[in-house]
Image (cartoon, rainbow, N blue to C red):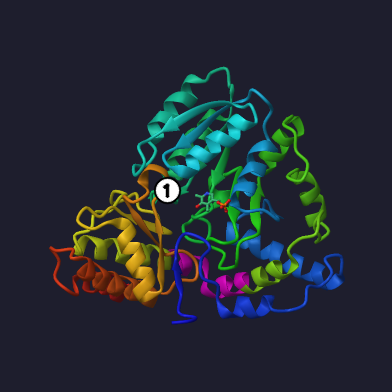
Amino acid sequence: MDNKLMLMIPGPTPVPEQVLLAMAKHPIGHRSGEFSKIMAEVTENLKWLHQTQNDVLMLTVSGTGAMEAGIINFLSPGDRVLVGSNGKFGERWVEVCEAYSLNVDPVTAEWGKPLDPEQFREKLEADTEKQIKAVIITHSETSTGVINDLETINRHVKAHGEALIIVDAVTSLGAANVPIDDWGLDVVGSGSQKGYMIPPGLGFVAVSPKAWEAYEKAKLPKYYLDLKPYRKNAAKNTTPFTPPVNLIIGLQAALQMMKAEGLESIFARHLRQMNATREAMKALGLPLFAPDGAGSPAITAVAPTTVDAEQVRSVMKKRFDIVLAGGQDHLKGKIFRIGHLGFVSDRDILTAVGSLEATLIELGHQGFTSGAGVAAAAKVIAKS
Ligand SMILES: *Cc1c(COP(=O)(O)O)cnc(C)c1O
């Protein structure tokens, strides 16, 4: 059936009609007064969303570009960096750091498990010479559905005193509490196609005063991703290069929707939908890939043993027009992932779980009572 496709992948995520309509206009000039007004509002609302007074800069890049900018603007070749790596994205930041000749010290955990904050504490405490210049953490590890304990790891970074904390918040910003100023996070990167409810194409980098101090000494090469011109131009409500004007107009509408919903409600909704999804999977006898207490509010990874994960995805798509994500790298075929990020309602979760039940019956998965998944999800959703 046309126009029934439901994206339940961790980006691109569904886009509300208000946003689509806002974007369905002729582009306006990016040096016009009209556009500057939009920039002013968007910049202010981005600070609200990021819970910060720091600069929040907008770049025409995907999330990876935002993170690359967040790394290379503040470091010099040979700088020692601790990089948390417990999934595809953690591995990517290791690769980016290596590409720029940083001295990478990966802090790893098995895929599907959270990073151990103690390992960071030990390395940071041992560094009496203050050679560690940055700690890079993926908050919500989208590839495995694991949320890392950013708050505790950041506390250890603060105790070190010197190192910057650089955070990939691509699937936690707008889904989980990331209080940048309260926690003193230095650099926080995110991307438009995740929690922002707009299409792909914009990257965001929040930068603290301490990070700007590091910028002055940083020697890695940069041009398009040099954040200083973005900062200078943002102060005048403009951008150094041509921005995707329609996307920014969409962002203006999306941020207005977020403000109307309120941060607390947004976080509570994501948590509720994560809990509903996780309880449903348990009731259906489907093993969760991330342990209780470490599940991401953006995405739930499921590792079925009695049915093929790719077959589940295929039936869900063909029969119910619901797109789930698969596993990446060695997890391909082993897991499927249900996105509940951004413009997702409780109804979408009930629909997805009901459709999944029908899919499981079709695939001959045994060991659950028909309706058990929907009942478990409904219980979580009805309670709150
Ligand atoms: C999606 C995502 C990114 C960025 O991916 P792009 O394809 O470059 O937008 C980075 N980190 C995490 C955790 C993500 O989920």
Residue at 75% across, 43% down: 226
Is residue 261 in the magenta section? yes
Numbered disc total: 1
- In front here: 105 or 40? 105
Place of residue 222 in the rendered image (x, y in percent of width and height, measured from the top left): 75, 38
**SS state under label 1:** loop
The residue that mark 1 highlights is 328
* Residue 78 seen by the camera: yes
Residue at 63% across, 25% down: 79
Residue at 81% across, 60% down: 238
- Three-letter residue code for mark 1: Gln
**Image quarter of residue 96:** top right
Q: On screen, 191 above or below 97?
A: below
Tell me the magenta residue range: 254-267
* Residue 373 seen by the camera: no
Residue at 58% across, 74% down: 257
Place of residue 377 in the rendered image (x, y in percent of width and height, measured from the top left): 27, 70
- In front here: 22 or 45? 22
Is residue 13 in the magenta section? no
Place of residue 105 in the rendered image (x, y in percent of width and height, measured from the top left): 50, 26
Q: Residue furthest top?
A: 129
Report if the beta carbon of the residue with label 1 is closer than 8 angstroms to ligand 1.
no
